[in-house]
Image (spheres, grey):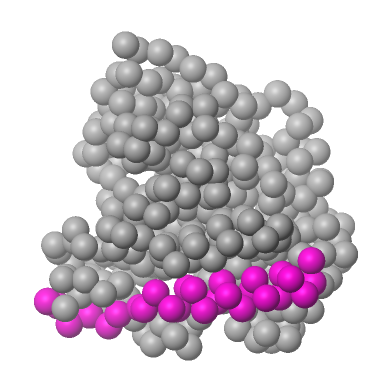
Amino acid sequence: MRQELEFPGFIDVHVHFRDPGMPEAETTASGAAAAARGGFAAVVAMPNTVPPGDSPDWVRANLASEPCGVAVLPSACITRGRQGAECARLEKLAEAGAAFFTDDGSYVADTRVMEEAMARSARLGLAVCQHAMDGALARGGVIRDCALARRLGLPVIPAECETAAIQRDLSLCRTTGCRLHIQHISTARGVELVRDAQREGLSVTAEATPHHLLFACDDLTADDANYKMAPPLGNREDRAELRKAVKDGVLMFATDHAPHPAATKSLGFKKSANGIVGLEAAIAATHRAMVEEEGMALDDWAQAWWRLPRAILSHSALERLDSKPRVTRIVVGEPWRIDISKFASRSRNCPYDGMEANCRPAQCDA
């Protein structure tokens, strides 16, 4: 039976708008239009732009407006230029209104730099969000071990690439008392580490993307870079543990919306860029994975999109969100097919095309 439901405004704490740097893939305006069409009231923009978002002026520029009625909340770099060598001006970035700190797209490998950043962030009351992929352990890999990787001879990214990074940062979390958020978690062991940290009482959160919840590397059959992302898709066991953790309230949702021009996503796993667009398919994809397939309660599913993300946002970001009413309206119980040709995003690097679901944002045409 068709129902139209209303929830507090959904928040996507992980999007890439490529503005400035790669406007042919996405601008703030086109990204915000995609977010609005996807049912989101607010998004947090990553600072891996060109130049990187490591200045107060960059933060303030992203706070200047609300295109399409979507609150674009800027995060800011952990390190200067996202180079990992020294901390950015964290105090000035916080004063300018940064939602949190992240070098997303890059792992802060220097333990001394990360410890200093977390200690300073703890004093500021802001979260540090980590792209938990240790490049030294990735060894140039492009995919997790699976039948497709072996058939095509693709270099493999081991699960330890993620889990070693999480273990180090949990140790620093204990030392500094900083709020730590693990971005786009992808492994069963990573989920276990986050569960244990939360039981221990550490201020640790993590996010699962729609694609890591819906797909598994075991099911890949073609050299299709629409399934290439960082971190890579896990196996079926990883996916099962991610779903269980979402259902238990251990993980929140986030899209990691990562637009790319067609030319950079048509080169197969070895040479294509990482990432997919997800804002306009995320509600359908997560509803299918968690509500339709796992039996998650609808209200709990919605809270993973609006209540849990609030925990990692700065006080100034929350003040902005709460400055006016923000709602998300969805339609459930009515079949809907995702059509990427109708996306507001400038990019089409998306594996969801043609996927059927029984939930959609009210803004999307059935």
Q: Is residue 199 left or right of residue 276?
A: right
In the image, residue 173 lies in the stretch drawn in magenta: yes
Q: Is residue 142 left or right of residue 329?
A: left
| Residue 59 place in picture, x, y as percent | 74, 57
In this rendering, would 204 be left or right of 278?
right
Tell me residue 107's x, y (percent). Answer: 57, 76
Number of numbered discs: 0
Q: In the image, is residue 23 part of the stretch drawn in magenta?
A: no
Name the residue: 29% across, 53% down. 215
Q: From the image, give the main secondary structure of the stretch colored magenta.
A: helix
Image coordinates for residue 38, horizontal then vertical, percent: 46, 35
Is the N terminus in the top left, top right, bottom left or bottom right quadrant?
top left
Q: Residue at x 78, y 58 (%)?
A: 126
Q: Residue 26: tell me if it is visible.
A: no
The answer, for residue 192, to whether it is visible in the render is yes
Residue 357 versus residue 80 in the image, above or below: above
Magenta residues? Answer: 151-177
Q: Residue at x 62, y 27 (%)?
A: 8
Q: Residue at x 14, y 64 (%)?
A: 222
Residue 125: image location, x then y, percent: 83, 57
Q: Is residue 65 above or below residue 358?
A: below
